[in-house]
Image (cartoon, grey):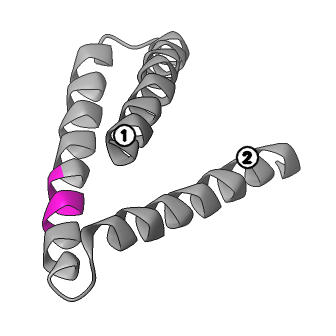
Amino acid sequence: MAMIIVLLGGYFVLSPLTVLIDSKIQHNIASMSRATIMSVKSLMVNLAGVFFVLICGAVSKIFSLPLVYIASGIICGIFVIWAVWRRKVM
């Protein structure tokens, strides 16, 4: 039950962030190809999700699934910290 709560919490955090990121991307693209760029972005995000699930499934055969989710959460957290730091530096 606790794992479901954590997953739902992650969804509630990521959903508004996705909307804000899409809005920022759309406002920064002034060309007529905005729809194409957004479609390619959606394709890439979905492909990354598919590969993430496949990799987690393969790794979970070696380690337990909760451990794989915790490790991926730590990796994603490190990436977020790096992205925020990089934006402040630039």
Residue toward you, 81 or 36: 81
Q: Measuring from the top left, give residue 71's x and y in whole percent.
A: 45, 70
Looking at the rendered image, the quarter that the N terminus falls into is top left
Q: Is residue 53 above or below residue 58?
A: above
Q: Is residue 87 left or right of residue 17?
A: right
Q: Amino acid at mark 1?
A: Leu
Asked if residue 43 lies left or right of residue 41, the reply is left
Disc 2 target residue: 84
Q: Nearer the viewer, residue 4 or 71?
A: 4
**Main secondary structure type of the part rendered in magenta:** helix
Q: Which mark is residue 7?
A: 1
Amino acid type at circle 2 is: Val
Which span is picked out in magenta? Answer: 50-54
Q: Residue at x 63, y 63 (%)?
A: 78
Q: Is residue 57 magenta?
A: no
List the single residue furthest toward the front: 1
In primary-sequence order, the first of circles 2 and 1 is: 1
Residue 86: image location, x then y, percent: 75, 53
Figure check: 81 above or below 74: above
Q: Secondary structure at mark 1?
A: helix
| Separation of marks 2 and 1 at Cα, in angstroms | 23 Å
